[in-house]
Each structure stands twice: as structure tokens, then as C-alpha cells.
Amino acid sequence: MRTIPVILAAALLAASPAPAVAQRSDTLHLSIEDAVTRMLRSSDEARTAWQLVQSSDAQVMSARAAGLPQIRLTSSYQQVLKNARAEMVSQIFGQKYTYNTTLNAQQAVFQGGRIFSAAMAANSVRGAARMDHAETRARLAVDVQRAYLNASYLARIAELQAQNLALASTRVAQTEQLHTAGRVARFDLLRARVERANLEPLALQAASDRDVALLEVRRLLDLPVEQPLVLVSVLEPKAVRSIADRATADGAPDAPRASVRAAELTARARRASVRVARADLLPQLNMAFNTGYLALPTLNGFPTVMGKVTADACPPGSVAGRTCQNNGWFADRNFSVTFSWNVFDGLRAKGNLDLAQAQAKISEITLSQVRETATLEVSRARNELARAIAAFGARQDNSAQAEEAYQLAELRYQKGLSTQLEVSDAQYALLTARSTEAKATYDLYLAVADLARVRGRDIPLPNGSTIPVRTDSRNALSGPLPAR
């Protein structure tokens, strides 16, 4: 079988009303591998999914922080300009300058299991976000390949329609020569002209469909509309069949589906949230320790010595036996244990507990639905792959036979042994066979990719490599993009 390569830059030049222009130097030659890479790194959906992973990482850190010691250092300086108590009662309240430095340490001893359960819930949410990110990567990898191959297929149809139109034009010229020589009737000439006129709008429609499909590829990849785009990847039937055979022969158990794992982790987080809500009904126990230094100098100035109470610090002429502080730093320490129990809060805790339990039951139902859907998708994908393999083999044989039949019909017509109707029928059958062969090739490749997605496997690419759908690397969206 002869395979006609898909070259978008040259397709449909004869049928397109636009004049041929030189290809710009900044034309983007995009392979299907580059399209997948660009989609996973620059698309809004991929970036949003990754930001949700980073947000869940921050939630885990915040939840764990509640169970760790809290240490706070504070320092203050206060200057009293006027004190009413000092004027009304005693100058002992008239201390003008106050320096205070305190180190406070707090530790939650028992919170009814709230801290531990909240940390478990946050960790499950993080795992669910990572699984959602993996599921998004797999879906985007398949979606961009589907859009790419659809554009490539429509370009193939446009090329075949252009070739069909060129053949019809050639046949019109031959029929005119035969009519001039008196070898064919005017009816045959009119029929050839009408057939060519009927093919021209089909060629124009095929070119329009190709351009629309290319716009969809640009939209998915956020490419400028004005930048020329050439799709360079061509699916080789043998390579696609080899990929399909490996997928069919793969009898290993299916990997855990990312969407199922995300639903499981979400249900686990909801169960942990029930324990968090139940903690509001239990008592709490906290410990705190404060240590610091306080200085009350009589004159404005930063204290530089440790505090003492001696007679030497008193001003001259003081009463015998009087002691005074030396304007230094005096230690100030205390330790406290706090026990609290919310006896009645207007049923707020009861309402929160009922809400958490309801959400946990909903998550369990959702998990069951996701599992059923995943099982059904695997079965559907396997059946689709079997259908695509059968259709692929049949279309290949049909295309080879249609091409041979057209060549024989054309030769018979040139020798005057057949009519123009037979040639037209053979040409239409060849066009249909080639288009269905290309469609069968693309369908087979996409069936393999979709089966890999629903089985939780890495997504295959035409060059034999794969796209890993699960990654915990923080550089998952970094790195250089393919050259434009």
C-alpha cells in the first residue's frame, strides 16, 4: 500500500483561493510530543491543578503547626507622660519609664484529638490534590493528542480532496481532447465538467475544516493566531499497530486510577473531619511558660545592668535602712496550666458534628460512584481498542484494493474499454478508502492512549516514549518549552 504523507504547508494550494506565500521564518513546526509537553506545562488547567497541590501542601503545614510549641518573643518600651493615679494616690504609680522583654512558650497538651485528626485530614487532602493533578495530566495529554490528530486527519482529507479535484481537472482536459477527436459524446464531457464543479466546494470545505481544527490546537496550546503552524508528526501504521499490540498483550494488573485514589483520600479526609468536629465536645488542656525581664529606670536610658535592691542605689540623704532598685533588669517568670471545657455552646458543636458526618457519608457515596465509573471506563476502553484494531486491519486492505481498482479503471478508460462513470465511481471509492484508513489509524492510536489513561498507565507517544502522568516534582511545570 502506498502511503501519502501529510504536508500541511503544501496541501490544497490548487483549491485554496488565497495566493501562495513564502513560509515565514518564525513558523512553528509542532510535533505531537511537543504539543503534549507544551500542554502539560503551559495550559491553564495544568497550572491550576498544580497550584491546588501547592495549596494543599500549605494546609498540611498549617495543620501540623497547631501541634508544635509556639514561642513568641516580645519587647516593649513605655514612657508615661502623665499619670492620674500618681497625682491622686501616690508617686509609686508614677513610674515614667518601663522596659519589658518576654519570651512566651505555649504547648497544646490535649485538644480532644483535634490536632492529630486535622493533620490527617490535611494530609489526605494533599494526596487527593496530587491524584487530581495526575488525572488532569492524563486527560490533557489525551485531549491535546486528540485535537492534534483531528487537525492532522482533516488536513489529510483536505489533501485528498485537493488531489481528487486535480484528477477531475485532468480528466476534464482528457475528455475535451477525446471529444474534439470524436471519440466520446458531449454527454461525457458535460458529466466530467459537472463532477469537477461538484468537487470544488468539497475541497474548499475540507480546507475550512482543517483551518478550524488548527485553531482549536492553537487555543489549547495558547499559540498566537497570526503565527504560522505546521503539524509535522505523521502516524506510521506499522508503529501504531505495534503500540496497539503491546497494549493488548499487557496482562499486568491495572494501576490504581488517580481519580479513584483521589476519591478515597477525600473520603478519608472527611472521616478525619468528623473527629475534628467531635473534639469540640471534649475538654482541652494547654500549658504556657513565660520568662522575661522588667526594668523601671528613674531616668530615661536603656538599662545595662541586672536588677538589684540595695541601699547603695538610694539617693543621698535617704532614711537609714532604706533600699532602692538600681534601674536594672529584674527577672519575671511564670508557668500556667489551663483546663477548659465548653459545657454548652448553643448546640454549635453538635451542628458541626452532624454536618461533618453528612459530608463523610456523601464522600463515601461519591467514592462508590467513582469506582463504578472507573471500572466501566476500563471495559469500554478495551472494547473500543478491540474494535479499532479490527477496523484498522480492514481499512488497510480496503485502501490497497481501492487504489488498485482505480488504477485499473483509469487505464481502461484511457484505452476506451470503460466509461467515465466507472472511473468516477473508482475515484470516489479510493477517496473514501484513504480517508477511512487515516481515520482508522488515528482512532487506533487514540484508543491505545485512552486505555492507558483509564488503566492508570503512562500515556504512550508515537515515538515510543511515554508521558508520566504522576509526578511529585515541584518542577512539574517548569523547564523550557519547545522552540517556536
Image: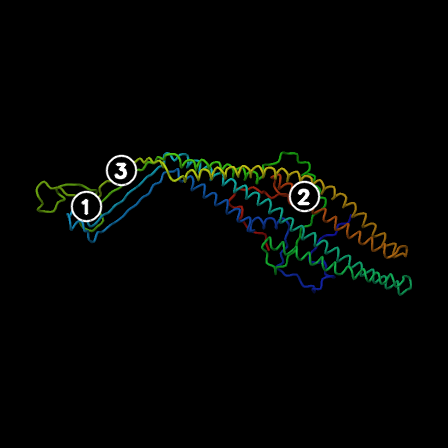
**In the rendered image, the vertical position of residue 479 relative to residue 118, given as above or below:** below
Secondary element at tag 3 = strand
The disc labelled 1 sits on which kind of residue? Asn
Task: Choose between 438 and 432: the one closer to the eye.
Answer: 432
Residue at point 90%, 57% (across, down):
416
Quadrant in the picture for the C terminus: bottom right
Q: Earlier in the sequence, mark 2 or mark 3?
A: 3
Task: Give, as a three-letter code, the residue at label 3.
Answer: Asn
Q: Secondary structure at mark 2?
A: helix
What residue is disc 3 on? Answer: 334
Horizontally, is 126 left or right of 380 in the view? left
Quote the CA–CA distance across marks 2 and 3.
Answer: 71 Å
Which of the two marks, 1 or 2, is nearer to us in this view? Answer: 2
Q: From the top left corner, tell me how far across and down residue 364 is, in percent.
A: 54, 37
- Determine whether label 1 and label 3 are within 8 Å by CB: no
Q: Secondary structure at mark 1?
A: loop
What residue lies at 64% left-to-right and 34% top-to-bottom? 252
Q: Residue beneath label 2, please?
A: 447
Picture quadrant where residue 294 is located: top left
Instruction: Give the residue pinned by disc 1.
Output: 327
Between discs 1 and 3, the one toward the N terminus = 1
Residue count near mark 1 (Cα–Cα under 10 Å), binned few <14, some 14–19, many ≥20? many
Q: Nearer the viewer, residue 212 or 6?
A: 212
Residues at circles 1 and 2 in contact by the CB criterion of under 8 Å: no
The residue lying at 38 percent from left, 35 percent from top is 111
- Residue 421: x, y in percent? 85, 56
